[in-house]
Image (tube, rainbow, N blue to C red):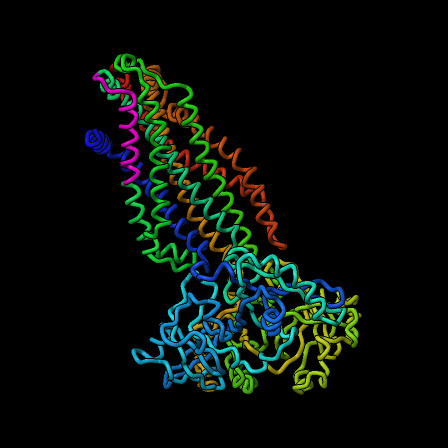
Amino acid sequence: MFSTYLKIAFRNLWKNKAFTAINLTGLAVGLTCCLLMVLYIQHELSYDKFQVKSDRIVRVTMDYSFNGGEPQKTVMTSTKVLPSFKRNFPEVEDGVRMSGGRSVLVKYEDKLFNEPKFLFADSTFFSVFPSFKLLQGTADQVLKAPNMVVISASAAKKFFGNDNPVGKTLQLGSAQTNYQVTGVSADCPSNSQLKFDFLASFSSLGPAQEETYFNANFITYLLLKDRYSIASLQGKIEPFMKKEITDKGTKINYHLEPYTSVHLHSPYDGFEPNSNISYIYITGGIALLILIIACFTYINLSTARSMERAKEVGIRKVSGALRGQVFWQFIGESALITFVALLLSFALAAMLLPAFNTLADRKLQLDQLFQPGVLISALLILAGISLLAGSYPALILSKFQPVKVLKGAFKNTGSGNFLRKSLTVFQFAISAFLVIATFVMQRQLKYIQTRKLGYDREHVLVMPMDSKMNDKSDLFKTEFKTNPEVLVVSKAYQTPVNILGGYAMSNSPNNENSMSVKANPIDEDFIKANSLQIIAGTDLTRQDLVNVSNEDYTKNYFQFVLNESAAKALGWTPQEAIGKKMFLDLQRPGEVKAVIKDFHFASLHTAVEPLVLFPDNWGAVMMVKTTGKNLPQTIAFLGKKWKELAPHRPFEYRFMDEDYNKMYDSEMRTGKVFSVFSAIAILLACLGLFGLSAYAVQQRTKEIGIRKVLGASSAGITLLLANQFIRLVAIAFVIAAPITWILAEKWLRDFVYRTDVPVYIFIVSGLAITGVALFTVSFQAIRAAMSNPVKSLRTE
């Protein structure tokens, strides 16, 4: 019986090659999109779950405020948190403090590289995170003493080739401090929030060993005794910290984040940017909608052929076939074509995976397509589509009355027509939603990229600096500016793109009226290099930096630059602020020299906060503002000068606008996915519309023949046939537009600074979808209108 069904299925599919090809294409494309999205979502949801102790690990975040000021939140914690919590809370079994996130210069013999994946960690690291496998070395010994470093297998190959690296010495940093390689670890998985090629002992940091709550520059992970301890421990922390911090004006509290929830749920980035669970829902929803469109396309194409196969079913029933046998025959055909489409989709997914990795900014591997989770999903999809896409045609065709069918008196029911039209409306409603949403997302992304931020990020090169370069910073400036394309050279601790770090600002020496602010050490050219606008006072000078050269900050007198928000927070207008005394973290006394116009130094998701810029002789980055002309030659010139002045360090640079764009990676990635999938949705919807229009033409063949005999023109018949489908598209748009507007507004509310949603986006989207639909329908309509009426009336 099964072999008979299979033969009939193959025969029917082969007989109708055009419809089979369209069905296969639609299902294969839909399934490919779904498979790739399942792969991506599975990867994102699996973040950090490979750690065997992941359910007992938490990351500590900090809230702090001064004298009733606005609480500041950060993932950075102090050195005292771990030892203090271990001593005072029985729930804490162990923990690890970590630091890093910046590139470090690594040298071995004649090999010199700037390594971005460099972290410091306590000796307990491999105890807390045992799933980071040590290939060489003992877990509790490899980070036990200062100047020890564990390197990844990739780093070992890069620096030592096939030689055993353990016991060898690497020179790290601009000071070329000797570190002994004590272990080799396996490369970190791609689904880990901790990725390192070099892991150095935390004790190498020296001063970081001092226990204090006021050096929040480290990330702390705690290993709890059991996974149920999180709530218990969280409830104890706030009362404990109230006893620990004796200064009544200072409030510090800590919160616990489950380790496996950090990547998708935490608002605080760690050593790499987090993703966002809402974008997982969005991409998963898109994949589901694409799959639904593909299924509906298949149903419409199958029912479009129902009249063509009605006599076949009638003959089978007259020959003794039962309704159940006819039903399962069509389910079998559906399963067969879905199975072939699924095989094609795996092949397509494998071919498109590199392009998808580029689109999603991930490193998904081909073997992940064959993991149990993906295969189970594929089998469920196969069964679901076979039943859902095959059931309706099977039910309709299996209940045909053979006598009526063989007499040619069979007509499809109104309910069948209603369902087919409903499916088409739903398809185009989804397509309209995706198209409008894509327009809105692209508009917001364009707004982000073109909004005036208060500083100029165009044609500015950013270069990492070390202590040796700081000593030569004046020489760098002089040499770089010999090129006429270089306008300004400046150094600072951070660029204006994303200024981090919390300070206490006060206009009183006893810390009264203190508040939390962001602050950035700069040189005398920072304001000019970034085109910041001074609205009161004057710019910093070289002498302002000379005046703060004493290592004991309390003996210096600082000239501060406030933004408008900081001046307002202290109760001053920009003009009133000039010359006013103030203190930064108590240890930096000084006065306000200038007030600058507010500029965006963080994501547009957040409002502009109070900011203090202050002179300092040390910088972590150098910014070179250029004219933007002859950039390749200018960069080559800067590289040559770099090698002359800093031969110990490779020449590396990035553009400031790249740093800015990185803050919106998730939005840009989702915007690209929306664009691609919107196009696919429209393609699949048009395939469904093609099927429905073919069905309509088939149903109205005799009517068209009679109209032509009575003198109807081809254009008139074409418009008659196209009109009913344009109405369906219009209904779909009316349904999709308000839903999309509501969801778009909800998404835009995540941005403090956002674009609007103008009416023309809906008009353009509606016209575009209608135009594509009209083109699709016209193909069938014109062919029917141009046909010979004699053929259609021959059977009458």
Q: Main secondary structure of the magenta part?
A: helix
Task: Tell me where residue 616 sits by quadrant.
Answer: bottom right
Q: Is residue 274 above or below residue 248?
A: above
Q: Residue at x 60, y 57 (%)?
A: 231
**Is 325 included in the stretch rendered in magenta?**
yes
Q: Which residues are magenta?
A: 319-339
- Residue 179 lies left or right of residue 409; in this view the side is right
Q: Is residue 213 above or below residue 38?
A: below
Q: Is residue 755 above or below residue 229?
A: above
Task: Tell me where residue 247 sits by quadrant.
Answer: bottom right
Position of residue 189 measured from the top left corner of the image (x, y, whole percent) = 40, 63
Task: Tell me where residue 509 sits by quadrant.
Answer: bottom right
Quadrant of the rendering where the N terminus is positioned = top left
Is residue 259 in view from this perspective? yes
How many discs mark residues in the rendered view? 0
Quadrant of the rendering where the C terminus is positioned = top left
